[in-house]
Amino acid sequence: MRRMTLMLMTILVLALSLAAPAQAEPKTTITFAEVGWDSIRFHNAVAGTIAEAVFGYTWEEISGSTPITSEALMSGDIDVHMEMWTDNIATYDEDIAAGRMQELAINFDDNFQGLYVPRYVIEGDSERGIEPIAPDLKTVEDLKKYASIFPDPEDPGKGRIFGGLPGWEVTTILEKKVQYYGLDEMYNYVLPGSDAAMSAAFISAWDKGEPIVAYYWEPTWLLGMYDFVLLEDAPYNSETYMEGETAFPATTVTICVSNDFKASNPEFCEFLSKYRSSSALTSEGLAHMQETGDDYISTAKWFLKQHDDFIDQWLTADQAAKLRAAL
């Protein structure tokens, strides 16, 4: 009888163990998405530094396009995505609602893009001996009055506006914007051949104290290092901005994790849920890296020291003390 009871108990335990859902094991290495731009590498380094110093993880990055890394996150091949540019993922809302991945926080939502000019064009720069030459320039439409100060060296009778890169959707929208405001009558719309050429045009103008009007976006190291002003436009309208009639929308950039990672790594996910930066702060970090030649890890540590208050906002008291000791 005792033997039969033991056998029945053994069978019951086995049955229950087979029926119970498998518990996800906590990870020891975190895999971050890396989609090819500096800002996500910077945020990966900040979060990765904290992962190592506070939580004892190692970490790595997997490179791929936005669609590929999004799919990898939903399949569990990637654990953390620090920059989900939600407007660039057609199925984002559907994927979140369906529980295919988990949104933990908004990283930043103050990222802007459009036509920029150096601040000294509008306000001057007394330290460099530069007088303001377009003090009333505030909007894209105001450019009508100032074509002569942005001359096209290859067509001196017209001004020059630098657009986006070939193949970018924004490049087509900007061309429509130039036409919508009638700027094509007095400006040539010129496309730089590469991001490097675009940056070089900005820096060359800045170093010489010369006017330039050109497309750029945030967050970037360039706008973290140099003081450029975004020209105002009509308030964003989802129905007309594609025709160039309004300002570009700011995109909400979120932090997402895979379902398995959230289930098995609750403490790290709690930290990520409190993570919040801004476009300006991101540009600041990228500018530091550009100025000093520091790598992403060194820049992340510098950033955390510079913004010590974030440590207390993101972490518990014990975790914060652990991180500070490691920096």
Image (cartoon, rainbow, N blue to C red):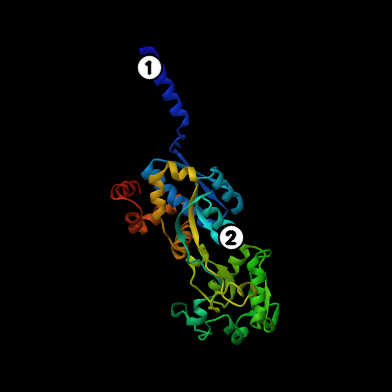
Circle 2 Cα neighbour tier, 10 Å, few/some/many (<14 / 14–19 / ≥20): few
Q: Nearer the viewer, residue 254 or 6?
A: 6
120, above or below 10, in the image: below
The residue sitting at 57% across, 84% down in the picture is 142
Most extreme residue toward the front, as rendered?
A: 1
How many marks the image carries: the answer is 2
Q: Which mark is residue 5?
A: 1
Position of residue 240 measured from the top left corner of the image (x, y, whole percent): 62, 75
151 with respect to 308 (left or right): right
From this viewpoint, is residue 295 visible?
no
Asked whether 181 or 228 is in front, the reply is: 181
Query: Which residue is the site of mark 2?
Result: 88
Outermost residue, right side: 155
Q: Closer to the camera: disc 2 or disc 1?
A: 1
Q: Please name the amino acid that badge 1 sits on.
A: Thr
Q: Nearer the viewer, residue 79 or 132?
A: 79
Residue 84 locus on image (x, y percent): 53, 56
Write the residue at 57% across / 53% down.
35
